[in-house]
Amino acid sequence: MQRRRPLVLFLVLLFSFPCYTLAGNDPSQPGLIAITLPGGAIIQAELANTPQKRAEGLMYREHLADDRGMLFTFSQAETWVFWMKNTKIPLDLIWINEKKQVIHLEQRVPICTRTDDSCPQYRPNEGALYVLELAAGRAESLKLQRGSKLQFQVP
């Protein structure tokens, strides 16, 4: 019986690794979480889960790949306001509720070149627990709409 323990432990670890990856925690992509969309596409999203990361967001980025994004997470659902100050690329903004359903989209939001704090602000009409930023046009090409259900696990 004692000789089987290492084998059993090995098998448990072997089969746990794919489950860990499928749960959205891909160790080959450190710092990213996998978001599965209704059509099966997967977005690898950076996690903005601290005040500093949320404040910086995608500011000053020159490019965002089609399979990448940023997921903002909050401790409570509110009508979180976003703007494009210092953001150099147009984006799609997607507000998501606690059931991981899309509740509001702002598509192809243009950059803001104003140097003061007068950039337009974008917000949903109901509370969101998450906001996903994608490259402009991706929400449409991925057929995301109000009510779309996303799959992801926030660490």
Image (tube, grey):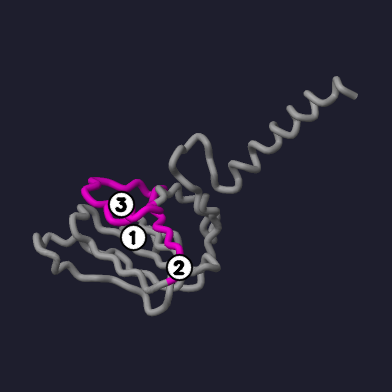
Q: Which of 139 and 23 is in front in this view?
A: 23
Query: Element under label 3?
Result: helix
Residue 89 is drawn in which quadrant?
bottom left
Residue at x 20%, y 52% (from the top left corner): 88
Residue 62: percent from the left, percent from the top?
Answer: 23, 46
Range drawn in magenta: 48-77
Quarter in which the N terminus is drawn: top right
Residue bearing mark 2 = 76
Residue at x 61%, y 42% (from the top left corner): 20
Q: Indicate the amino acid at tag 2.
A: Gln
Residue 44: percent from the left, percent from the top?
Answer: 45, 47
Residue bearing mark 1 = 137
Residue 126 is drawn in which quadrant?
bottom left
Question: Is residue 144 visible in this depiction of the protein?
Answer: no
Q: Residue 52 carries which label?
A: 3
Q: Does the magenta stretch include residue 54?
A: yes
Q: Does the magenta stretch include residue 22?
A: no
Residue 77: percent from the left, percent from the top?
Answer: 45, 70
The outermost residue toward the top is 3
Residue at x 30%, y 59% (from the top left corner): 91
Q: How many marks?
A: 3
